[in-house]
Image (cartoon, rainbow, N blue to C red):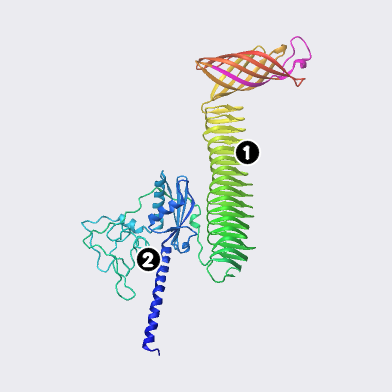
Amino acid sequence: MLPARSLRHALLLVALAGGPLAARLAVAQGAAASARAAVVLVVEEITAEMDEAALRKSIAAELRGPVIRAGDAGAREARGVLSVRVQKTELFMVFRPRSGSPVERRISLPEGRSERLAAVSLLAGNLARDESAELLASLRPPASSGAPAAPPSGSSARPDGPVAPGSPLVPPGGTGGPGNPAGNPAGNPVGNPPAAGTASGAPAASSSGAPAESAPVAASSAPVAEEAPALPAAPVTEPEPTGEGYCSVHGGEDHPVAASLFSPIEVPYGEQPGLTNFALSLAYGHIGGLYGLQLAPGAVRTTGDATGAQMSVGGWVGGRARGFFVGGFFHHIACDTRGVQISSFVASQKGNLVGAQLGGMVSLSQGSIKGVQLGSAVAVTRGEVRGNQAAVFHAEAGSIVGLQASLFSMTGALYGAQTSLFSLADQASGAQLGLVNMTGTLSGAQLGLLNLAGPVSGFQLGLLNIGGEMKGPQIGLVNIAQRQEGYSFGLLSLAGNTTLQGEAWASHRVEGAVGLRITTGLAYTSFTLVYDNSNGLDRIGGGIALGLHLPLGANFFTDLDFGYYALPVVGHRQSGDDDPKADHYEGDQKIRLMLGYELGKHLSVFAGPVFTARQRADSPDFHLLGDAVVGALF
């Protein structure tokens, strides 16, 4: 047994050593609490006027707590990950808490840098904090009388929900120390009532049993601060399913190297998968996150984010993918991708892609694509494609800004070109090229055998053209439009504003001609029956002419047309020559330029020169002849 004096010395040494140790433990506990209160900010995309440092500072002020980067110390112990993406005037934000389900929102941003920063910070606070208490408080009816009642003895002196800064219940500055930005007990989210026995109004007992010293609390006669109002209503719309909600983060211990035969037969063994720099698997490997290279002749799975390269027969990434990803048979990414995804059979992803997706048979994306999507059989994107999308059989996208090519192409809005056997779009600004082209509104061109469109600002070129309100030419064998304000050139052109007129004319070489003129917009088609007695031979035939009708004002107009007239011989030369073949010819090609005057609503006269190219039966040469025409429209 130690003497009493030696015992006292030993106790004194323990006390002296314990003081610094206790201080170090207190510092470590404070740092851990601060890390648990921190939020990791991941900025995926922002506009030029919103720099990341200013955004982080603004969100930290709103949350009243630290906001750190993914690579900072304490990121693994943070209470959640906040992802921000700004595209033009749209804000997409997702908060993934350490435990629980992700929450995502999309809002329209206001104009101005400061206003946008404020809007981002308010939405970040709305997602990162539990504001259900605030919302419920805002829905409660106001108290019927005077000052609020003092809290019952032994209950929390802190009102239910967050306390407004500067109130008597919050120390000046509104902070409660590291890791406790709103003066709440450690680990208690802002807006939740304190746990029993740890209420801010009840002093906590120290290790010695004596009550701990606390900040002075205002007298009960002082007015209790009103509950902070809920976040102002913002124009929040339900986000499109871009895959953000499917993203996951890894847990477990980090290991530079991991190897497995068939997980969980792996090294390190029996641990929750963590971040790995190099992973090698023979049959099946499972890691938490990748920052490097993952190889397997079988299948691999990465629970969280993957940065680097993943090559296997079948691959799966549960978080964001950055780099080069190859699946010999199948590869799937559950979140956003920046890089290249390749699979010999099926390549699929649920997020947005910046880069290229190549599927040996099928390429699928539920988000948007900036780059290239190729599938030898099928390529489908639910969102927008900014770039090129191509497949042998079927290509489909929510909208296209670029080129879409396949045997059957389909998209919502088209801003670019669509080329296939069958091209289908809700609306098109650009060109559709195929055997069959169909769209709603067209601003551009359709070139194919069959073209169908709604309102058109452009032109249609094909055998059969069908359009709505046409502000541009239709060129084809048959043209049909709801209304034509441009030109329709074809064998038959019909529209809501088509006019039908009878036509009669004669010239020095044509004794008489009668026919029907169909005018649609500024273009017309004439079907004519012609009698000719040139050189003493009787010829009766028919012809067709395509022309332009241009009003000049003051009832004057000019017509220009090109026609072909077949004139077979139906008699003999009147001079008695028994061989009419010497003067037999197959037809005339005529160009007529006429000046006309409208005498009334249903009667016009015209006259002008005619240039004829006549082809003889016994020669391929043409004989150029001049003539003059006079006629009338009725």
User: What is the number of the mark on residue 435?
Assistant: 1
Residue 628 in percent (x, y) is at 63, 13
The type of residue carrying mark 1 is: Leu
Labels 2, 1: front one: 2
Residue marked by disc 2: 186
Q: Determine whether label 2 and label 1 are within 8 Å by CB.
A: no
Q: Residue furthest top?
A: 575
Q: Residue at x 21, y 61 (%)?
A: 221
Residue 495 in percent (x, y) is at 53, 28
Q: Quadrant of residue 523?
A: top right
Q: Residue at x 39, y 71 (%)?
A: 23
- Magenta region, residue range: 557-586
Q: Looking at the picture, does residue 371 appear above or below residue 472?
A: below
- Given residues 270 and 255, the one toward you in this image is 255
Q: Looking at the picture, does residue 196 appear above or below residue 441?
A: below
Secondary element at image label 1: loop
Q: Quadrant of residue 315?
A: bottom right
Residue 349 in percent (x, y) is at 55, 54
Q: Quadrant of residue 517?
A: top right
First reached walking from the N terminus: tag 2 or tag 1: 2
- Given residues 395 and 282, the one toward you in this image is 282
Crowdedness near tag 2: few (<14), some (14–19) or many (≥20) residues, C-alpha within 10 Å: many
User: Mark 2 to mark 1: distance in Å?
Assistant: 69 Å
Residue 536 in percent (x, y) is at 72, 11
Q: Residue furthest right?
A: 578
The type of residue carrying mark 2 is: Ala
- Given residues 260 and 382, the one toward you in this image is 260
Q: Is residue 105 visible?
A: no
Q: Is residue 579 magenta?
A: yes
